[in-house]
């Protein structure tokens, strides 16, 4: 049998692809990491840069936390506003936190690490166009590289090529789409007077907004209103609608006292995509497997985590195709198990104009009770599942808190 070119071909050198490349490298694998864009310094523009606490163990495993802190990453301590008031978990070190670092800093840093890792060949300017198949399993890719066409073979191909995954399309993996009633625009601001360094989120039923602190004291201010009430006005006059929307928030950030340092960036249509994460010879990670609603700021963390789940499942089976395909099945099952509950909650909220009963119960209690606030925060960072959020004990406490509040 012909010798494969690599142990793994990874398509897409962003969060998911670079994480997978680094982890495969640490296990001694030969990795081709293909990236369609030609520069080492490209980054994902459409992102608001918050990596949650749930992703920190992966960053620690990659030995990246110190490098990110040196690059200016700041803890993403946050408060959330809902109609019952502000919800602020403990920021005293008892609750793990994530990091905020702009993608223009994070993506090149991660890509450079991956390019320097033993056994990793980063191929910039290589766009994958087709899958190679042998005996019903994916066994490589065809890609354009400048005016040339190249073919690379490996027992495992990884699609880490984002929400519009060309790999998934070429391999015939079906995309399940779910609509999103919100749209979003953001811009960067600096020099907020008396900035307290706390990120903030407003969950106002059908409308949401965010103010995330990043390195260099730069804040990204995000408006994610519902389309029915706001899209026409935003289309007619983006700058005025954006500023009016932000100014109307409870305890609004004083954007008029800060300096706007970017144009507005955003999208008016952002459906959620979900795909089967594996089939023989192929795995999808990051947004290629699940592109969720940005209002929860969790897609980047799941890109890191799904890369880790994949590598842990398959790393010992790369030299045996039968074992590898069984391991890919286990990866797919884990991906579904870990994210199904979260995605169901996120999908429903993306289609709905208000919180459901359970969300109202927990958010209202969290605004009145520190313990529930911290519990809800753990869920928001996806450290615990929806089932763990709604344990009988937590629900009982939330009910009691609200009852006490109503009777006082
Ligand atoms: C408005 C907005 C705000 C967001 N805010 C947050 C946030 O605060 N926190 C958070 O965690 N997440 C956030 N996200 C989500 C986050 O940006 C994504 O989940 C994350 O970037 C996914 O990483 P990825 O590596 O899977 O894909 P991507 O980052 O999309 O990278 C895919 C890579 O594949 C390459 N590629 C594509 N096609 C090919 C091809 N054919 N051949 C070779 N290479 C290819 C691309 O050039 C790219 O480098 C936000 C998303 C949006 C839209």
Image: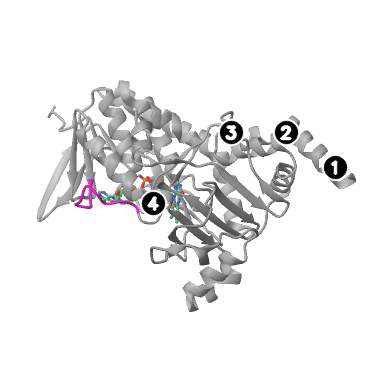
With respect to residue 253, does 245 lie above or below? below
Give the residue pinned by disc 2: 394
Q: Identify the residue under disc 4.
A: 163
Q: Which badge, 1 or 4, comes first in the chain's sequence? A: 4
Question: Disc 1 or disc 4, which is closer to the eye?
Answer: 1
Q: Distance between the residues labelled 4 and 2?
A: 35 Å
Disc 1 secondary structure class: helix
The residue positioned farthest toward the right in the image shown: 407
Q: Earlier in the sequence, mark 4 or mark 2?
A: 4
How far apart marks 2 and 3 lie (CA) works out to 13 Å
> Badge 4 local density, few (<14 within 10 Å), some, or many (20+)?
many
Q: Name the front one of labels 4 and 2.
A: 2
Badge 1 is on which residue? Answer: 403
Residue ID for mark 3? 384
Q: Earlier in the sequence, mark 3 or mark 1?
A: 3
Specify few, some or many for label 1: CA neighbours under 10 Å numbering under 14, 14-19, or 20 or more.
few
Residue at mark 3 to residue at mark 4: CA–CA distance: 25 Å
Label 2 crowd (10 A; few <14 / some 14-19 / many >=20): some
């Amino acid at each position: 049998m012909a010798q494969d070119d690599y142990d793994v071909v990874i398509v897409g050198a962003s969060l998911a692809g670079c994480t997978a490349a680094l982890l495969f490298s640490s296990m001694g694998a030969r990795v081709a990491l293909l990236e369609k864009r030609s520069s080492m310094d490209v980054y994902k523009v459409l992102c608001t840069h918050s990596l949650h606490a749930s992703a920190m163990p992966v960053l620690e495993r990659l030995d990246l936390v110190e490098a990110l802190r040196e690059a200016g990453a700041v803890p993403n301590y946050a408060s959330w506003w809902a109609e019952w008031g502000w919800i602020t978990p403990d920021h005293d070190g008892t609750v793990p936190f994530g990091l905020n670092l702009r993608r223009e800093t994070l993506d090149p840093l991660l890509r450079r690490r991956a390019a320097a890792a033993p056994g990793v060949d980063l191929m910039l300017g290589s766009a994958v166009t087709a899958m190679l198949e042998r005996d019903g399993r994916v066994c490589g890719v065809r890609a354009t590289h400048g005016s040339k066409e190249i073919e690379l073979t490996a027992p495992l191909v990884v699609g880490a090529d984002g929400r519009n995954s060309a790999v998934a399309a070429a391999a015939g993996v079906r995309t399940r789409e779910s609509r999103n009633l919100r749209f979003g625009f953001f811009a960067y601001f600096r020099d907020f007077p008396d900035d307290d360094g706390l990120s903030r989120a407003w969950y106002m039923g059908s409308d949401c907004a965010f103010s995330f602190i990043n390195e260099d004291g730069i804040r990204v201010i995000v408006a994610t209103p519902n389309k029915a009430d706001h899209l026409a006005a935003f289309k007619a006059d983006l700058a005025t609608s954006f500023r009016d929307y932000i100014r109307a928030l409870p305890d609004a950030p004083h954007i008029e006292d800060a300096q706007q340092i970017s144009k507005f960036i955003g999208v008016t249509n952002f459906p959620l995509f979900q795909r089967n994460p594996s089939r023989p010879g192929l795995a999808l990670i990051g947004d290629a497997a699940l592109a969720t609603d940005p209002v929860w700021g969790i897609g980047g963390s799941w890109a890191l985590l799904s890369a880790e789940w994949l590598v842990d499942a398959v790393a010992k089976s790369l030299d045996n195709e039968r074992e590898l395909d069984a391991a890919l099945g286990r990866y797919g099952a884990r991906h579904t198990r870990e994210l199904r509950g979260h995605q169901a909650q996120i999908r429903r909220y993306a289609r709905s104009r208000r919180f459901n009963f359970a969300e109202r119960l927990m958010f209202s209690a969290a605004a009145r009770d520190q313990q529930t606030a911290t519990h809800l925060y753990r869920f928001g960072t996806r450290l615990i599942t929806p089932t763990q959020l709604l344990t009988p004990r937590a629900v009982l406490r939330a009910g009691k808190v609200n009852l006490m509040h109503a009777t006082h």
